[in-house]
Image (cartoon, rainbow, N blue to C red):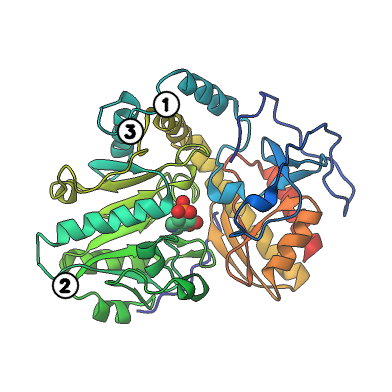
Amino acid sequence: MAQAPELMLDTNTEPTPLTPAPAPIQRAAGQPLVADVAVTSTRQSPDAVLATYKRAPGEIVRGEGVYLVDSDGKRYLDFVSGIAVNALGYGDPGLVATLHAAAEGLVHVSNLYETAPAAKLAAALVERSFADKVFFCNSGAEANEGAFKFARRWARTIGEVKHEIVALRGAFHGRLFATLAATDRPAYRLPFRPLAPGISISERNLEDLAATLDAETVAALIVEPVQGEGGVRVLDGGFIRELRAMTKERRIALIFDEIQCGLGRTGTLFAYERFGVEPDILTLAKPLAGGLPMGAILVTDEIAQTIKAGDHGTTFGGGPFVSSVALHVLDRLSDPALLATVRENGAWLGRQLEEVARRTGRVRAIRGVGYMWGIDIMGSASHVVEAARELGLLTCTAGECTVRLLPPLVTTREELAVGIDVLEQVL
Ligand SMILES: Cc1ncc(COP(=O)(O)O)c(C=O)c1O
């Protein structure tokens, strides 16, 4: 059965001073969202930063609610959220208070000692998910690399040659050697070959996967339930359920990479909830610690049983400071009212984008769910991103032709409407 694209019509920062969330800005059509605020640039020598990113001009100096402010005082409605990180926006009073309180306590003691925040955070993740155990690390790529190791460790208890990892066409799993081997971006991969061996990419359809997922040799299949960097593609529920059945039957670990689509972004705490199936391993990162670097690998008891002391580690993972903050974020993102609003506003956002597509005639396709949308543009997506930024709206791309919208999960419908208005002007 072919994987059909599914149109779903449902949908980093210094602590900033505690300022009340600003009212949506009133402006004449076509006018940039410029506010009269005093800000000071602390820019020193940006050229000393290795140029791995093509950065937008200007310097961002602070954030308020769902707005960022640059050193000229220009305000931007932020539909990027630090690439799906800042789910609670900027200057959230609860998050700021938690950061202050956490800074008063232990910051780091290493994983040689037990600390309460990591234990509580692991228990909270276990309580809310399919998982029995959690490993903490510091980024998305690190979480996926660890997930590959855990899957291999488990699979070797079944068969000595069961070690292959399979990813899907359109996948993005990170920029380290194993995760890059599982990432379908030739431009990211080619300069760095040879990548880690034993990792391959399969076409995103059941016929190919049935042939590729050899029970003797394959340890794990890694899947983003909503492919983010690959163009915001919501995988079909039937396809995911078939994959679950196939991997179960062949004793292949199913890894869901929810680094971008997890923790509320699709309107459920975990994206897998919408499909009615559970993975064996799940990876999280981006929004988990409110802008502090943190990743997590959630595993079932069966996999956890095969992992012994010394099998894996990381110096900073699950430190008390970052874990205290993540506990607060997890609690907030588990709020049923917030999740319901993301679902409802997301469905509304999808309908508005369809209308924009119809009125402008400049859009090839719209895909998404919750607060995660991709708009395939006739032409270059980066031109649209640049023009929207000029008008005070931050968006990002997902491939050459797709504009990606990742608003903070606290963005109101009125704020979404301001962003849609700017997008329509640009298109
Ligand atoms: C789905 C997915 N997996 C993994 C990663 C890698 O995360 P990080 O940049 O924290 O290493 C990303 C980053 O965009 C992602 O979107």
Q: Which residue lies at the image location 35% right of the left edge and 39% below the top edge?
A: 317
Circle 1: residue type = Val
Q: Earlier in the sequence, mark 2 or mark 1?
A: 1
Residue assigned mark 1: 107
The answer to whether the residues at label 1 and label 3 have Cβ atoms under 8 Å apart is: no
Residue 89 at x, y percent in the picture: 61, 38
SS for dot 1: loop
**Which residue type carries mark 3?**
Ala
Residue at 50% in and 24% down:
98
Residue at which label 2 appears: 215
**Quick check: 195 left or right of 373?**
left
Q: Nearer the viewer, mark 2 or mark 1?
A: 1
Q: Residues within 10 Å of mark 1 (few under 14, many from 20)?
A: some
For the question of whether residue 258 can be seen, the reply is no
Judge whether 401 appears above or below 372 on screen. Answer: below
Circle 2 Cα neighbour tier, 10 Å, few/some/many (<14 / 14–19 / ≥20): some
Considering the numbered disc 3 on the image, is that residue within a helix, a strand or a loop?
Answer: helix
Q: Residue at x 73, y 37 (%)?
A: 42
Q: CA distance from mark 3 to mark 2?
A: 34 Å
Secondary structure category for the residue under label 2:
loop
- Residue occupied by mark 3: 124
Q: CA distance from mark 2 to mark 1?
A: 44 Å
Q: Is residue 149 visible?
A: yes
